[in-house]
Amino acid sequence: MAVPERAQHTWKFVVAYHGARFQGWQKQADQRTVQGVLEAALEKLSGEAVHVQAAGRTDAGVHARGQLVSATITSRVRPDKMVLAMNAQLDEDVSVLSADVVKDGFDARRDSIAKRYVYRVHHATAHDPFFGGIRWHVRGRLDIAAMQRAAQDLVGDHDYESFRSVHCDARHARRYLWRVDVAEDGPEVAIEVRGNAFCRNMVRIIAGTLVDVGRGRLAADAMPAILQARKREAAGITAPAHGLTMEEVYLPDDAVRAGIPPDARFPGWPPASSASAAAVSDDDVVDE
């Protein structure tokens, strides 16, 4: 069989990783990061420097099941072999789930329109040692009905200033969330959040505030006042990083699967131009 010729292509990858052994997504000197290990793997395959772009930059300890990544590389690896070739270079805490050649100019950050996160809580007297690395153990039982009522007040087009880190450097905290849901399955609680973009620590602060409601530290009807306050101290605690997972990144063709409401309006949606899509990405500083 003839050896494929080297060719330059733009690739779209879907990547999963366990955040415990990474200092977040973004490449840093002398630190193990997801971007760093992916670029190292691609450089081995291409023999040249490679830059990868993620749809959102997760913080240290945060996991992903469906991080979207783009890169332009020159290699001999055929599209049907790229997943195997990449995973042969990677450790067990990170995996390429799919790899596709896409049109030139595709950018995972600027072309994505929304994301889905799930924050997982285990509420019980004793912790579960088998899942401690991906769930936040909260002793005792939570009032799930109160958390569900509170979550609904976070849905919509709001200024989430109270729900972002004081270290967030996004220009503003105006975001559109169309789903904030709290579901219980025995001792397991899943807080699902879908939105067009997220500020630094936003989902973790939402999760921590909802857990404070579940513990009775905040009233179920407290969310409108917290939003109106526009102060970080008005909201609850920042939930630990290890309970959060980026589950999916949505592209324009994924609107139905994402569950975007027909009347939704936010920067870049409905699709109008690449410029509007870029504007929302510029504010999407650290997705977690």
Image (spheres, rainbow, N blue to C red):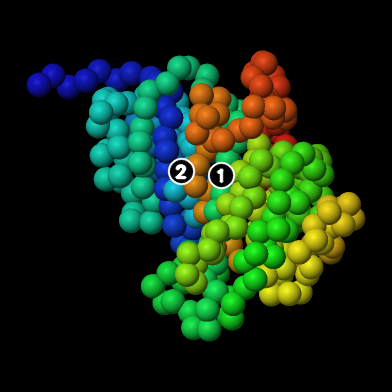
Residue located farthest toward the bottom when viewing the structure as drawn: 125
Q: Residue at x 29, y 20 (%)?
A: 6
SS assignment at label 2: strand
Please rate how many residues cluster around mark 1, counting C-alpha atoms within 10 Å: few if below 14, some from 14 to 19, many from 20. Answer: many
Q: Residue at x 38, y 19 (%)?
A: 8
Q: Is residue 70 left or right of residue 283?
A: left
Q: Is residue 9 visible?
A: yes
Residue located farthest toward the left when viewing the structure as drawn: 1
Please rate how many residues cluster around mark 2, counting C-alpha atoms within 10 Å: few if below 14, some from 14 to 19, many from 20. Answer: many
Q: Is residue 100 left or right of residue 258?
A: left
Q: Are marks 2 and 1 in contact (CB under 8 Å)?
A: yes
Q: Is residue 108 left or right of residue 37?
A: right
Q: Residue at x 56, y 35 (%)?
A: 259
- Which residue is disc 2 drawn over? 66
Q: Residue at x 69, y 29 (%)?
A: 264
Of residues 94 and 233, the one nearer the viewer is: 233
**Relative to residue 167, is residue 260 depicted above or below?**
above
Point out the frontmost of discs 2 and 1: 1
**Relative to residue 106, is residue 282 depicted above or below?**
below
| Rendered location of residue 17, percent (x, y) | 43, 52
Give the CA distance from mark 2 to mark 1: 9 Å
Q: Is residue 33 visible?
A: no
Three-letter code, disc 1: Arg
The quadrant where residue 183 appears: bottom right
Of residues 152 and 111, the one nearer the viewer is: 152
SS assignment at label 1: strand
Q: Quadrant of the N terminus?
A: top left
Q: Which mark is residue 116?
A: 1
Q: Which mark is residue 265?
A: none
Three-letter code, disc 2: Gly
